[in-house]
Amino acid sequence: MRAEPVAPEPSARDWLARLAAGERPLQALALLGGGLAGIATIVQMVLLATLIDALLVDERPLASLVPCLLGLVAVLPLRALAQWGQEVAGQAASLRIRRRARDELLDHLARLGPGRLAGYHSAGVAQRLVDQVEALDGYFSRYLPQQVLAVAIPVLILAVVAWLDWLAALFLLLAAPLIPLFMALVGMGAERLNREQFVAVARLAGHFIDRVRGITTLQLFGRTEQATREVGAVADDYRRRSMRTLRLAFLSSAVLEFFASVAIAAVAIYVGFGLLGYIGYGPADELTLFSGLLVLLLAPEFFQPLRTLAQHYHDRAAALGAADGLVALLQEVPDAVRDAPVEGGPARPTAPGRLLELDGVTIIHPGRGRVLGPLDLVLDPGEVLVVTGPSGAGKSSLLQLIAGFLGPEHGERRLAAGTAFAWLDQRPLLVQGSLADNLRLAAPEATEAQMQEALTHAGLAALLERLPLGLETSLGERGEGLSGGQVQRLALARVFLSPAPLVLLDEPTASLDADTEARVIEALAALAREGRTLVIATHHPALLRLADRRLELDADPVREAVDA
């Protein structure tokens, strides 16, 4: 068989081009607005040159120039309106593109799942979703439209100048390529600096958040001063990188302005000497005040689109630097695709009446090697499976595999279609908000009575009675205000509140006292009597009484035992 060629990974430029392709109408409106502004500029300069020539050369009375004055007055707001339309259309296109890019990233993060995302710092992921996506703004709203206008408008102005004086047009034509040349030279360095700057700011965000989260530990060990110095050093490194990027931007702008000014000065000298009669070759002797003045007025406008493009070229460098990091994240392959037995095809369904089937699955973590398997497992609806074994035997990894957070390196995982699950891990996440906000993460439509019942099952009824605001009591980030055991029980209450038929529990009675543990086990037994399927990873012997089956994991091949 002939191997199919592997498609190359999309580059940052390919990804940006694909995003831009979805907003062609708005980008066309931005180009139309910019083009109309350029035409209005040419008309404005023609009317101004005509007015001055009529007053100084033809000595026409001011009353006869009223139509010219009215035209000049009318074209100014039209030019401003066209520029406003260009800006609004560009911003609207950029906003939609950034929203679509952020949705694409969020969907991809959801597909990657908690297992794969564990290798990324939360601050780095947040920085990509916020700062790096926002860095695309100038590229789509300003640079892309200006890239076309920087060619179209100068060509139009060059045609008008060539009609007036081909030698002046030649001066402009010779100077014009210098600006794109320096833009390209500067852009290569700016893109690299922006890429390094995004890496630095992600490192700074992660460094700072780690120190804030660990402030209690740092104080206990007397390391707060050292931590402060470390954060200051990382911040100073970011400052130096930012200043290096700004220095390059200012230097490049100064160089581009210099060449544009030299070119305009050369045209002005040519026009001046031509009008004075010192140049006797070419079309110089045919110059008039009107044609010479119009050439001088159009010369700065000829370079203005190129100078504007040069200013926005740094938006391009910033976007490419940001897109490199975003594309690298998008190219992370979700583990779940390994569930498919045939490449590109859907996973086979479970056998009739089966909830879950694992066939020879093996989980391998980078740097740790094999952490589970090979393992065969069949789970029927309504069963209670207790998974035991020493720490590091793969209990948590097995739960993550069942949930789809991890994919098997070898073997196949099959889950009945449409199966939802409730989850409790060893470090439950609580968000900043009220008790009700945290409970409704599992059941958004839950009533107050249902939430109180779930808290009772989790052993938090007494705590709820002591709180003056009840379910509206505010919690800090990560459950600040609650003890470790109370955080665990609140997360367990979410499980009781969820209607999911499959319940995955990782050490559900950790951090609980004996009385609370007994109440929680009784509540879990009630869930089992409702017909729910429970998979419990635990060290606690008391939970074994719930088991229909017990799966023991250790360093040797997996062995399964049936408990009466």
Image: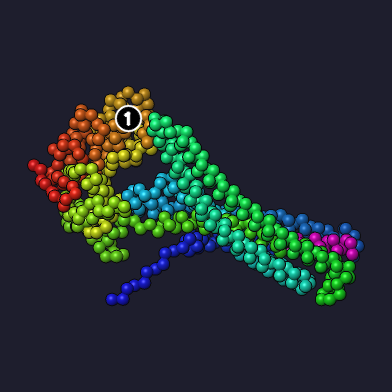
The local crowd at label 1, few if under 14, some if 14 to 19, many if 20 or more residues have their Cα within 10 Å, is: few
Residue 20: x and y, percent? 51, 61
Residue 526: x and y, percent? 18, 37
In the rendered image, the vertical position of residue 162 relative to residue 560, given as above or below: below
Residue 15: x and y, percent? 47, 61
Q: Quadrant of the C terminus?
A: top left
Residue at horizontal 82%, vertical 67%?
Answer: 271
Residue 434: tell me if it is visible. Answer: no
Spot the residue most to the left.
Answer: 564
The residue under label 1 is which amino acid type?
Ser
Q: Is residue 113 left or right of residue 132?
A: left
Count the numbered circles shown.
1
Q: Image quarter for residue 468?
A: top left
Q: Is residue 435 left or right of residue 33?
A: left
Q: For mark 1, give the secondary structure.
A: loop
Residue at horizontal 17%, vertical 56%?
Answer: 352
In the rendered image, the vertical position of residue 374 relative to residue 422, given as above or below: below
* Region of the chain picked out in magenta, as a range: 42-57
